[in-house]
Amino acid sequence: MADPHPSDRHGRPLGVLRLSLTARCNLACPYCLPDGQDPPGLLTLEQRRAVVAAAVALGARSLRLTGGEPLLHPDLEALIESVQPLRQGGLRELALTSNGLLLTAERARALRQAGLDRLTLSLDGTTGASVARMAGLADATAGTRALERVLAAIEHARAAGFDPAQGALKLNAVIQRGANADELLPLAGLARERGVELRLIEFMDVGNRNGWRPEAVLPAAEMVARIGERWPLEPLGRGRHGTASRWRYRDGGGVLATVASISAPFCGDCNRLRVTADGFAYTCLFAPPGSGLDLRPWLAPGCPAAALREAIASLWRQRADRASEERGEAPLPRPMPHVEMARLGG
Ligand code: SAM
Ligand code: SF4
C-alpha cells in the first residue's frame, strides 16, 4: 500500500491546507488587487469538505480559510462546523485570515462557536491616510472608517474567545517601501498596546498586477532593526514548516514576527497545499497561471473519496517547486507571470 502521508521530491510532507473561499474582496489593496468576481464553477460546501478530508488523510494538520475575503462567504461558519469531525482524523487547527471589515461581534462569536481556533486580521496602517493608501480606499475618511472597523474587530474577536496570549489572534501587516514603511513603529506600538502579535510581511511578487519591484521590498532584517531600536528585541527563530520568524520584546511587551518570503525564503520546509475557490490545487504561492490541478473531476458525484486522495497525493509527490529560493539564486530579467494572490489564497 502507498504511504498514506506522501512527501514531495524535496522530502517535504503535506501539513497545511490553505483553502480560498472566494477570489472576491471588499477591499482592493494595490499590492494584491483581487478579481472583481469569482470564476465559474465554485466548489460547494460538500466538495470543500471533501477536499479538506482528503488533505487531512494525507497528513494536513492545519486548515487555513482565506481568499479574497473569506467573511464574504455565506457558508463560512457552516464549513467550519462541517469539518469538525475531521479532528478525529488528525486535523488540529482551524484558522482564518481576514481583513476584519465584516467581523462584527456576532460574527466573531459565530466563528468561535462553529469551531474556529485562530484568527489573523490584516491591517497595514494606523492612520486614515495610510489605511486608505494600503487598502485602495478613496480617501483618509474612508481609511479612518476602515481602521475603526478593524480595531473594533480585534476587540470583537478577543471578546469571542480568540485569546491573543494563546496565539489565537494575530495581526498581519504588509510593509512596502515608499508606501507604509513609516507605519512600522506605530503598528508595532498598536499591537503591543493590544497584546497582539504583529506579523510584518515583506511585499511579495505574487500576481501580475501589483507592480512589484525589488526596490519596494523592505527586508525583514531592516524592519526588525528599526523596531528593535525603539523596543529591543531578541530572536526566537522560525518554527519548523512555519512562515514567520519571531522575536520577543526584551521589555516583556510580547512578540513580533516577520514573514521574509523575499529576503529569507523558507521553501526548504514548505508544507502548504493551496486550493482555489473553484477547486484548483497549487503547491506554490508563486505558481504560474494555468498550472493548477483541477480537482473537480474527482469531486463529481459518485467519485470515490480514495480517488480524490490519490489525485492530491500524486500532485504532492511530483512537487518540486521552490520559487522563492530560486528567485534569490538567479534573479530573473523580467517578472514571471503568477496566479493572483486573492485567487490562490493568501
Ligand atoms: N482578505 C484577507 C486579508 O487581507 O487578510 C485574506 C486574503 S489576503 C490575500 C491574505 C494576506 O496576504 C493578507 O494579510 C495580505 O496582506 C497578504 N498579501 C496580499 N498580497 C500580498 C503581497 N503582494 N505581498 C505580501 N503579502 C500580501
Ligand atoms: Fe482583499 Fe486581503 Fe487582497 Fe486586501 S489583501 S485586497 S483585503 S484579499
Image (cartoon, rainbow, N blue to C red):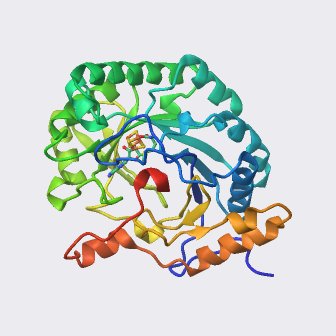
Which image quadrant is residue 234 in?
top left
Q: Which is nearer the eye, 305 or 24? A: 24
Q: Is residue 231 visible?
A: no
Q: Quadrant of the N terminus?
A: bottom right
Residue 104, position in %: x, y? Answer: 53, 20
Judge left or right: residue 91 versus residue 335.
Answer: right
Residue 10, position in %: x, y? Answer: 50, 79
Which image quadrant is residue 192 in?
top left
Instruction: Identify which residue is drawn at 17% across, 41% down.
Output: 179
Residue 190, position in %: x, y? Answer: 30, 25
Q: Is residue 150 visible?
A: yes
Q: In the rendered view, tell whether residue 233 sits above or below residue 284.
A: above
Q: Which is nearer the eye, 157 or 139? A: 139
Looking at this view, name the residue that lies furthest to the right.
302
Q: In the rendered view, tell whether residue 231 sits above or below residue 86.
A: above
Residue 132, position in %: x, y? Answer: 26, 30
Judge left or right: residue 134 versus residue 277.
Answer: left
Instruction: Identify which residue is drawn at 37% across, 72% down.
Output: 323
Judge left or right: residue 71 versus residue 196.
Answer: right
Instruction: Identify which residue is drawn at 29% across, 36% down.
Output: 136
Q: In the rendered view, tell whether residue 120 sits above or below residue 108.
A: below
> How many marks on residues?
0
Instruction: Identify which residue is drawn at 41% across, 70% down.
Output: 288
